[in-house]
Image (tube, helix red, strand yellow):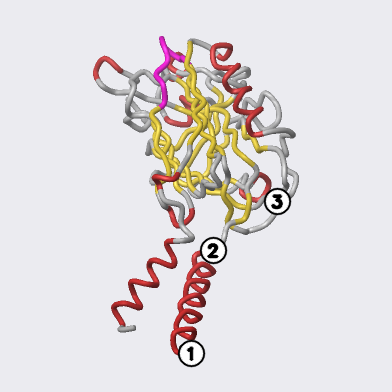
């Protein structure tokens, strides 16, 4: 076998370990409405499809159940929490790491309950977002800063092991335009698996939910969430009539993270298979 043929064979062998986008079998759960009650049944159906229990902060990997993040610190939190990128708070406890091309993230309430509370408006340096958005689980929402893109990647909870999930879903607040807000799903080797546009919701502060479950063995190793078509910022107002759609996120729900082979492991397997094939040919 010449050098070019060996190179092509190596690509083919490695391809055996990567799921093809055409093979992805996606089951979609989606709903939108004017308030939390309008999407609650669909969110609950998605939870049921992922299974019980909610594994919370228990170390993994576990065989059953799901993980959830509601951005509220376990209670009706009123204090804003702001961090840079990467957002690592849930990497060790629930197996989810978040990054953005922007400057970081905030978990922030929309309204203050005491004068000491820091709201989303105060974090961003503007006014009016309390009337634009609403929450699914009170009191905080989640959003990137200086960007409208969030990447979620997965790890085994309690370990630094890269992982994948069979399902991922999120609640969105104030999706006015159908088109800009999407979730793109990627598998092992960052191969595209599926993409879906989030349903628009009626009125100001309406809620939307999109959840996707793969049932043919695919694992999501990265979910790219695009919220609207502009980043929140000073003087940036939601104006769908003028083509500006600002969107923030609330609850995330996803399957129990399971370890996936690292690229180096797959490469070694491919090399081993090629070597075994060459040895068989030489022995003939």
Give the x, y percent position of residue 124: 43, 31
Q: Residue at x 57, y 20 (%)?
A: 42
Of labels 2 and 1, the one closer to you:
1
Give the x, y percent position of residue 92: 66, 51
Quarter of the rendering occupied by the N terminus: bottom left
> How far is disc 1 from disc 3 in space, using C-alphas?
43 Å
Q: Residue at x 43, y 37 (%)?
A: 225
Residue occupying the far bottom of the picture: 283
Helix, strand or loop for the magenta stretch, by majority: loop
Labels 2 and 1: the sequence-earlier one? 2
Q: Secondary structure at mark 3?
A: loop
Label 1 crowd bin: few (<14), some (14–19), many (20+), radius 10 Å: few
> How far is disc 3 from disc 2 in space, using C-alphas?
16 Å
Labels 3 and 2: the sequence-earlier one? 3
Labels 1 and 3: the sequence-earlier one? 3
> Residue at label 2?
262
Is 129 situated left or right of 165 in this image? left
Residue occupying the far left of the picture: 242
Q: Residue at x 50, y 69 (%)?
A: 264
Label 3 crowd bin: few (<14), some (14–19), many (20+), radius 10 Å: some
Q: Secondary structure at mark 2?
A: loop
> Residue at label 1?
283
Q: Which mark is residue 181?
A: none
Span shown in magenta: 198-206
Give the x, y percent position of residue 63: 72, 46
Is 246 contained in the magenta span?
A: no
Is 234 situated left or right of 266 in this image? left
Q: Which mark is residue 61?
A: 3
């Amino acid at each position: 076998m010449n050098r070019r043929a060996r190179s092509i064979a190596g690509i083919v062998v490695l391809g055996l370990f990567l799921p093809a986008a055409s093979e992805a079998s996606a089951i979609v759960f989606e709903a939108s409405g004017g308030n939390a009650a309008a999407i609650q049944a669909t969110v609950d159906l998605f939870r049921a499809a992922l299974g019980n229990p909610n594994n919370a902060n228990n170390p993994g990997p576990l065989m059953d159940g799901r993980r959830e993040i509601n951005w509220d610190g376990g209670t009706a939190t009123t204090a804003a929490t702001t961090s840079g990128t990467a957002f690592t708070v849930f990497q060790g406890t629930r197996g989810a790491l978040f990054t953005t091309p922007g400057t970081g993230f905030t978990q922030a309430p929309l309204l203050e309950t005491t004068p000491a509370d820091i709201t989303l408006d105060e974090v961003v340096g503007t006014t009016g977002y309390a009337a634009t958005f609403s929450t699914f689980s009170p009191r905080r929402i989640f959003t990137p800063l200086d960007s409208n893109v969030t990447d979620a990647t997965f790890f085994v909870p309690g370990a630094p092991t890269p992982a994948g999930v069979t399902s991922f879903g999120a609640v969105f607040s104030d999706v006015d335009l159908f088109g800009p807000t999407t979730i793109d799903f990627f598998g092992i080797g960052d191969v595209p698996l599926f993409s879906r546009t989030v349903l628009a919701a009626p009125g100001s502060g309406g809620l939307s939910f999109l959840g996707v479950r793969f049932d043919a063995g695919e694992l999501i190793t990265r979910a790219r969430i695009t919220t609207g078509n502009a980043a929140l910022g000073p003087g940036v107002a939601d104006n769908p009539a003028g083509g500006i759609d600002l969107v923030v996120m609330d609850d995330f729900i996803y399957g129990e993270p399971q370890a996936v082979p690292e690229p180096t492991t797959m490469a070694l397997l491919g090399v081993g298979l090629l070597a075994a094939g060459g040895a068989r040919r030489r022995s003939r």
